[in-house]
Amino acid sequence: MTDFPRPLGAADKNSQTFAVLVWIGTIFFSFVPALIVYLLKKDDAFLQEHSKEALNWAITMLLLTLIGQVLTIVLIGFLLIGIMVIAQLIFCIIGAVKASNGQPCALPFNIRLIK
């Protein structure tokens, strides 16, 4: 996993906690927590980058879910949806751990629609 191209400011504990909550919320509520934090916390660079990454991840997962649902017609979609559930859990936990350590996180299979 690579770091963000631009350096982030030092994150305080409050920002780290919000970023962890964004990643954990993404597991259960898809893009909603990341979108709320992205729109409300414009002044915090660390939180902005983590919410942007989580939002991009949630959008990527939504697109793959749609593709998986279409592919269930030919039965391969069930495999894709199973893999996506596991990937969602693993990559959101990775994001939460990096956020709790104050590190940036860039997920490898993320479609970056929001820059």
Image: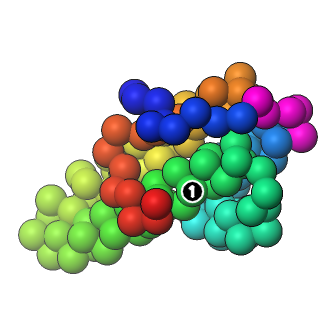
Check if residue 13 falls in the magenta segment.
yes
Q: Is residue 84 magenta?
A: no
Q: In this orientation, which residue lies closer to the viewer: 56 or 29?
A: 56
Residue 39 is left or right of residue 18, and the answer is: left
Which three-letter amino acid code belongs to the residue tagged 1? Lys
> Which residue shows up at 15% across the image and 75% down it?
73
Q: Is residue 46 left or right of residue 108?
A: right
| Residue 74 image offset from top left, x and y in percent | 10, 69
Q: Is residue 91 above or below residue 113?
A: above
Q: How many marks?
A: 1
The spot of residue 31 in percent (x, y) is 58, 66
Residue found farthest to the right: 14
Residue 63, relative to residue 103: is it above or below?
Answer: below
**For residue 87, side relative to residue 58 (left or right):** left
Q: Is residue 62 visible?
A: yes
Q: Which residues are magenta?
A: 10-14
Q: Circle 1 — which element?
A: helix
The dominant secondary structure in magenta is loop
Residue at the image point whose x is 31% and y is 63% from the top: 64
Q: Which residue is mark 1?
A: 52
Question: Residue at horizontal 52%, vertical 51%?
Answer: 53
Quadrant of image for the N terminus: top left
